[in-house]
Amino acid sequence: MAELDEVIHQPLRLRIMAALTALPDGQGLDFTQLKKLTGATDGNLGAHIETLAKAGYVAVTKAFVGKKPQTTVTSTAAGRGAFARHVATLREIIAGSGR
């Protein structure tokens, strides 16, 4: 059985990756949308996004919309693959627990 991905397994990071991988490839969510979806504080969300970015699982783009800064987070190909493997491992655990 494959190992769970410790980077993704943390509950908030799991929520972030689930939200991002549910989107079409190349589409992301802005920081405010992720904050609403996860219920995280700014600092907590930022720290977890940074962890995912360091692992290569998300890309972070910063831009200005008008005069307001906007941070957009998008899952990378590596992140989508890691999330799919993580979900597959969870499914193996669930399937094996019924035996």
Image (spheres, rainbow, N blue to C red):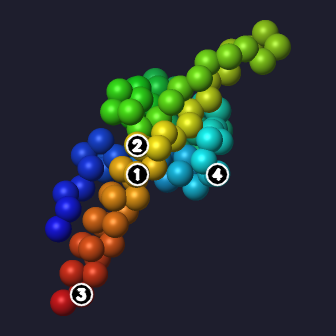
Nearest the camera: 92 or 80?
80
The kind of residue tagged 4 is Pro
Residue drawn at (34%, 46%) of the image: 8
Residue at the image point whose x is 53% and y is 26% from the top? 60
The percent position of residue 32, horizontal first and vertical second, equals 64, 32
Query: Which mark is on residue 81?
Result: 1
Q: Position of residue 41 (x, y in %)?
A: 50, 31
Residue under the point 40% across and 58% down: 84
Label 1 close to label 2 by CB (< 8 Å): yes
For mark 4, give the secondary structure: loop
Q: Characterize the local packing of mark 2: few (<14), some (14-19) or many (20 or more) Cα atoms within 10 angstroms.
A: few
Circle 3: residue type: Gly
- The first of marks 3 and 2 along the sequence is 2
Q: Earlier in the sequence, mark 3 or mark 1?
A: 1
Q: Which residue is mark 3?
A: 98
Which quarter of the picture shows residue 73?
top right
Query: Separation of disc 3 and disc 1 at Cα?
Result: 27 Å
For badge 1, the amino acid type reads Gly
> Which residue is denoted by mark 2 in the rendering?
78
Q: Which mark is residue 24?
A: 4
Q: Secondary structure at mark 2?
A: helix
